């Protein structure tokens, strides 16, 4: 039976509702209570209808009394245990075990990692400081009577992923910078306290004379402005308390008594994603050792700055002037800023340079023609057939398209990797601009994009104002290519360069299809299945083996074979599959980050 559409009234809330407390505190377990009395009272007690809220409040009050009567240090111990009982689910425990495993590898092989024997105490001080700030955040960050909830669990990723990269690829100028930026996960205290704590940590532990405190203050404020901007955009969805949306439900999936269903709407970006994105773009702007030696990253940096500046300048015009005027001003400003910034690097007008760069190289021109031809045929075909496919197949068709575009010739990611990166990074800017146009419904183009893209949206896209999946997909494909390009340049290539294409183009798509069709065993608390995770592992390893065999046979002069690190590749693929199955972050974004960093880390150690 086809799904029915219901007009659903969603009430937007600023904060997610906290989970209910445990039924019984740890302190109660250790109280000297007569078992017979407890059993008899439980047997005679009859549940009363419509009294669950009052019962829960009474249990909370009793628990508070129990904790207050317990002496030190048991009262603190019991509170910590109660907190863990409430917050530490199976999914979170599994993710913690994965990162503890990686931490154990680092601890056991710290002498093999550059400078770690000199910086471990700074990392420890950073963790202690952040933990103390988070405790203060939980204790003092809420108004009296306000329900308390802990910081977002996914902050773990926004702290540990940059740290893993900094450990594997040590940069004296930015090592302490990225550690100090971790204080921005303290999200309930006054911003002045957060900024001051970050600057104070950097001032105390900074050892690099090339990055003085004044320069870090500028870096810190850049991160602060980016995070504030993303939060502001994220909260734009809540300008109206009530919004009518359409959802699809099957009769056998949900029992609907009324046409009005109360659902909870979240933001497009989680707070952890905002922190991680802010760290990445702060490094993109200020970490010159990471960006300046690599032309594709320099071009992307300038394009990003031009896009942000042009958008901020044009937005007030958009509110009061016709879209033709606003679009013209935006285009002129974007062109001027891009050309102004790239002139010193390219030595000529950026448009003239890109024309010469492509059209005077036969192979690049051929690739461009093939890409445009494929897109001209496949994209309209997908849009035409999408109404006959399930939503999962609609979305995963783009994953398979990525494989065709990037792997139809081995030269795309080997000899012409710079051209490919320039194309991918430029396309990311185009996608961000397209999403701005779609969200703002700017002119007829924005309305058209809203209409045609809605059929590819999933529940994550519907949670907030932006459709991020297709942007994250392109970013996820690009990150491992950049990572390997930084490591090996254009002279050599490793399997890392193909991790994004394989993990997202093939592994994630196969996992979703297998999980959706045969996923009978679910990760407890998640809609993802064990069968899907197994399919992710198997499809990735098979693809890695095929690529390794082909490149070892045909490009042995430039290709770095996987052997003798097959065990390491299996381990990091297995860990990535576990994180993909248990985390609620967008896997298009974080899996392509954890795969290359984890693989490189384990290779350094074993």
Image (cartoon, rainbow, N blue to C red):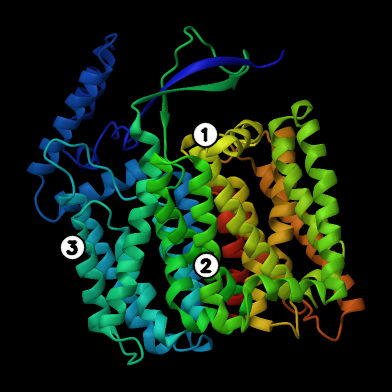
| Residue at mark 2 to residue at mark 1: CA–CA distance | 36 Å
Q: Is residue 131 above or below residue 92?
A: below
Judged by depth in the image, the label closer to the viewer, 2 or 1, is 2
Q: Which residue is mark 1?
A: 462
Q: Which badge, 2 or 1, comes first in the chain's sequence?
A: 2
Which mark's residue is nearer the viewer, 3 or 2? 2
Question: Looking at the image, which residue sits at the far right?
Answer: 553
Question: Mark 2 Cα within 10 Å, few/some/many (few <14, many 20+)?
Answer: few
Badge 3 crowding class, 10 Å Cα cut-off, few under 14, some 14 to 19, many 20 or more, is some
| Residue 435: quarter of image | top right
Disc 3/disc 1 C-alpha distance (Å):
34 Å
Q: Secondary structure at mark 1?
A: helix
Rendered location of residue 138, percent (x, y): 22, 50
- Graded by Cα atoms within 10 Å as few (under 14), some (14 to 19) or many (20 or more), the crowding at tag 1 reads some
The residue that appears at 30% across and 68% down in the rendered structure is 221
- Residue 513 falls left or right of residue 337: right
> Is residue 52 rendered to the left or right of residue 319?
left
Image spot of residue 372 (x, y percent): 81, 55
Pointer 3 residue: 193
Q: Is residue 417 visible?
A: yes
Image spot of residue 64 (x, y percent): 14, 37
Determine the image quadrant of residue 521. top right
For the residues labelled 3 and 2, the Cα–Cα distance comes to 39 Å
Disc sitting over residue 336 in the figure: 2
Q: Residue at x 74, y 33 (%)?
A: 517
Extreme residue toward the bottom, this view = 209
């Amino acid at each position: 039976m086809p799904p029915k559409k219901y007009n659903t009234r969603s009430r937007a809330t600023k904060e997610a509702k906290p989970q209910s407390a445990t039924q019984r505190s740890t302190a109660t377990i250790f109280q000297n209570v007569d078992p017979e009395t407890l059993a008899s009272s439980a047997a005679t007690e009859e549940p009363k209808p419509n009294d669950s809220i009052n019962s829960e409040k009474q249990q909370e009050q009793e628990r508070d009394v129990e904790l207050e009567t317990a002496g030190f240090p048991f009262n603190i111990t019991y509170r910590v245990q109660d907190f863990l009982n409430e917050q530490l689910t199976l999914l979170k425990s599994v993710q913690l075990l994965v990162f503890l495993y990686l931490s154990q590898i680092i601890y056991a092989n710290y002498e093999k990692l550059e400078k770690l024997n000199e910086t471990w105490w700074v990392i420890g001080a950073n963790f202690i400081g952040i933990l103390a700030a988070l405790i203060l955040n939980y204790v003092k960050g809420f108004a009296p009577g306000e329900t308390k909830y802990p910081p977002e669990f996914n902050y773990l990723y926004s702290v540990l992923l940059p740290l893993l990269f900094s450990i594997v690829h040590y940069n004296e100028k930015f090592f302490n910078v990225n550690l100090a930026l971790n204080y921005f996960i303290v999200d309930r205290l006054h911003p002045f306290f957060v900024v001051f704590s970050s600057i104070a940590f950097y001032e105390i532990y900074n050892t690099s004379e090339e990055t003085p405190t004044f320069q870090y203050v500028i870096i810190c404020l850049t991160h602060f402005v980016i995070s504030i901007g993303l939060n502001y955009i994220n909260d734009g969805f809540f300008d109206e308390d009530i919004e009518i949306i359409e959802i699809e439900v099957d009769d056998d999936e949900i029992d609907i008594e009324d046409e009005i269903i109360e659902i909870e709407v979240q933001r497009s970006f989680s707070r952890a994603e905002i922190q991680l994105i802010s760290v990445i773009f702060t490094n993109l702007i200020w970490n010159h050792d990471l960006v300046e030696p690599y032309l594709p990253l320099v071009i992307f940096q300038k394009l990003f700055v031009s896009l942000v500046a042009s958008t901020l300048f044009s937005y007030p015009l958009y509110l009061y002037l016709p879209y033709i005027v606003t679009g013209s001003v935006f285009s002129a400003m974007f062109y001027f800023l891009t050309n102004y910034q790239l002139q010193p690097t390219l030595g000529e007008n950026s448009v003239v340079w890109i024309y010469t760069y492509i059209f005077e190289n036969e192979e690049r021109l051929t690739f461009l023609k093939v890409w445009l031809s494929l897109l001209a045929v496949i994209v309209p075909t997908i849009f035409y057939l999408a109404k006959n496919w399930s939503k999962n197949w609609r979305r995963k068709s783009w994953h398979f398209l990525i494989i065709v575009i990037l792997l139809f010739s081995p030269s795309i990611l080997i000899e012409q990797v710079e051209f490919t990166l320039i194309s991918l990074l430029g396309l990311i800017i185009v996608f961000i601009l397209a999403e701005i146009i779609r969200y703002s419904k700017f002119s007829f183009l924005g309305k058209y994009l809203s209409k045609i893209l809605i059929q590819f949206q999933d529940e994550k896209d519907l949670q907030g104002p932006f459709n991020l999946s297709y942007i994250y997909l392109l970013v996820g494909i690009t990150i491992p290519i950049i990572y390997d390009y930084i490591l090996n340049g254009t002279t050599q290539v490793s399997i890392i360069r193909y991790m994004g294409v394989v993990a997202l183009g093939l592994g994630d798509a196969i996992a979703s299809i297998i999980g959706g069709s045969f996923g009978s065993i679910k990760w407890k608390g998640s809609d993802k299945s064990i069968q899907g995770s197994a399919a992710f592992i198997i499809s990735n390893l098979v693809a890695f083996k095929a690529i390794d065999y082909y490149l070892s046979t045909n490009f042995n002069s430039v290709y770095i074979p996987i052997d003798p690190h097959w065990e390491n590749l299996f381990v990091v693929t297995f860990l990535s599959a576990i994180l993909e199955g248990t985390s609620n972050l967008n896997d298009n974004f974080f899996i392509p980050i954890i795969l290359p960093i984890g693989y490189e880390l384990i290779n350094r150690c074993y």
